[in-house]
Amino acid sequence: MKVVIAGGGSVGTSIALDLIDRHHVVTLMEQVGELAEKLKTMLPGVSVLAADACEYSSLAAADVRSADVMIAATGDDEDNLVISWLSKQEFGVPRVISRINNARNEWLFNESWGVDVSVSTPALITSLVDEAVEIGSIIELMTLAHGKMRLIEVTLDANSPAVIQNLTLDELRLPDALRVVAVVRNEQPLVPSSSMHFLEGDHVVLMARTDATQDCTTAFIA
């Protein structure tokens, strides 16, 4: 695939190196000329352009229209929103991924700004902290499908309805808006089956529609 990355900081360069190792065609846009020149020697195989990805003319020069994926990875949320919007609305990039630097801005990163997938490092770190201390709570891992779906995790305690009632996944009768996609038990990932029972300490990973939180609470939280 052809991937264009906006932002030549540590995040953008790390992504570029990983994608080149996976044999993708990668273009990196960095607006600071001196840094762009350094990156040309640091990133063999990556096409590095000294250009401001917030400008239409720069995106056109980078041939963003032919890209399969645009990654807005700058350290500025406003820039990432502008890059995402231009990439989707003006150049029709099929998949736009945007970095969120400030978790308070997360609500902006949706399809109206051209964002297909947003990645919030602060929110991810917060969720990992929550995961370490919050048993019996819903932890949001990621938003998908333009914010309409969420990947969530619940760590079951001894009072979880699924544990106390010794119900199988089939017997839980979860609605279509909620699906168990994985269970981690004793540090081992398990593929969920209709006959699976749930145990105290299970980490249950679910794909949920944003309005299905109450269904998850009813099934897994006391």
Image (cartoon, rainbow, N blue to C red):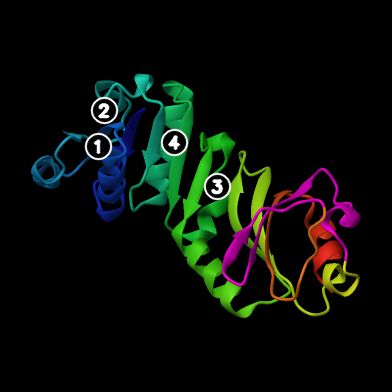
Asked whether 187 falls inside the magenta stretch, the response is yes
Position above or below: 123 against 91: below
Q: Quadrant of the C terminus?
A: bottom right
Secondary element at image label 2: helix
Q: Nearer the viewer, mark 3 or mark 1?
A: 1
- The picture places residue 27, in percent across and down from the top left corner, at 25, 32
**Callout 2 environment at 10 Å: few (<14), some (14 to 19), or many (20+)?**
some
Which residues are drawn in magenta?
167-194
- Give the secondary structure at mark 1: strand
Q: Is residue 205 above or below residue 211?
A: below
Numbered tag placed on residue 29 in the rendering: 1
Secondary structure type for disc 4: helix
Please report the residue visible at 71 percent of the width from the left and 71 percent of the height from the top.
Answer: 137
Q: Which residue is mark 3?
A: 108
Rounded to the nearest angstrom, the CA distance separating label 3 from label 4 is: 11 Å
Mark 1 or 2 closer to N-term?
1
Q: CA distance from mark 2 to mark 3?
A: 24 Å
Q: Residue at x 12, y 46 (%)?
A: 42
Identify the residue at horizontal 27%, vertical 41% (top origin). Answer: 21
* Residue on which disc 2 sits: 58
**Crowding near the residue tagged with mark 3, few <14, some 14–19, many ≥20 C-alpha atoms within 10 Å:** some
Q: CA distance from mark 4 to mark 1?
A: 14 Å
- Which residue type does callout 2 highlight? Ser
User: Identity of the amino acid at label 1?
Assistant: Met
Mark 4, residue position: 84
Q: Is residue 127 above or below residue 88?
A: below
Q: CA distance from mark 1 to mark 2?
A: 9 Å
